Amino acid sequence: MASGLERFGAAADALGVPVEPVRYPQGTRTAADAAAAVGCDVGQIVKSLVFATPTKLVLALTSGANQVDTNRLGELVGEQISLAAPEAVRNATGFAVGGTPPFGHLEPLPTWIDKDLLAYHTVWAAAGTPDSCFPITPTQLAAAAEAVVGDFAQR
Ligand code: 5CA
């Protein structure tokens, strides 16, 4: 069984998105862990958060500095949302919570991206494992994830 890192690399290749993941033995399971490992602002870390509606799963690429306002994101999605169960995340994306990458999933999910991420030159997202991240420009990230830009953070 290929590791999450290998599977994400293959999925990114298949999408034609060049990625250069970096492994951090100290771990990158949370946004704070990832920011400490990478040495960047926590706001530059991309949290790939899967939410469930009554009918589907959706993905919210959220700045590590922000919490999702589920009412605001639900309005954008057009349905009520709640955080998906870890099993649902793994089944839909092929990756575990803590290492879920922002694209390259088993099934493409309707995706929104936090507008605050667009303020950075470079952001860092999980590369398929809880000890890896890769850098990408927010514009490239939005394109690769086919994400809609939205304002859904708690203010
Ligand atoms: N590797 C880091 C930085 S890229 C990372 O994946 N961060 S994350 O925020 O996208 O993933 C951790 C997130 O997983 C948490 O913010 C939380 O929303 C979610 N999570 C943690 N535990 C659970 C759980 N039991 N059920 C559903 N989601 C969970």
Image (cartoon, rainbow, N blue to C red):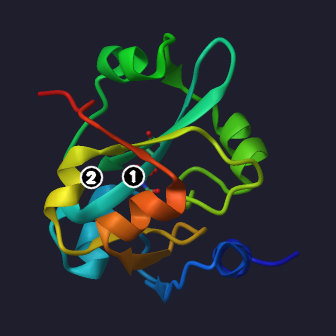
Location of residue 37 by image quarter: bottom left
Tell me whether the residue at label 1 lies in contact with that at label 2, contact meaning CB atoms closer than 8 angstroms. Answer: yes
Which residue of the protein is positioned furthest toward the right in this rendering?
1
Task: Judge by depth and name the residue closer to the eye, 19 or 97.
Answer: 19
Q: Is residue 148 above or below residue 153?
A: below
Q: Image point 49% across, 10% down: which residue?
A: 80
Q: Amino acid at mark 2?
A: Gly
Q: Is residue 95 above or below residue 57?
A: below
- Whether residue 57 appears in this view of the structure is yes
Q: Residue 70 at what x, y percent from top left?
A: 36, 20
**Ligand 1 within 8 Å of the CB at mark 1:** yes
Q: Image point 45% across, 48% down: which residue?
A: 147
Provide the secondary structure element on which disc 2 rests. Answer: loop
Residue 28 relative to residue 19: left or right: left
Q: Which mark is residue 47?
A: 1
Work out which quarter of the rendered image holds the C terminus and state it.
top left
Residue 110 relative to residue 95: left or right: left
Q: CA distance from mark 1 to mark 2?
A: 6 Å
Q: Image point 57% across, 38% down: which residue?
A: 110
Location of residue 129 by image quarter: bottom right
Q: Residue 152 at what x, y percent from top left?
A: 27, 30
Disc 2 target residue: 64
Q: Residue 99 at what x, y percent from top left?
A: 55, 61
**Ligand 1 within 8 Å of the CB at mark 2:** yes
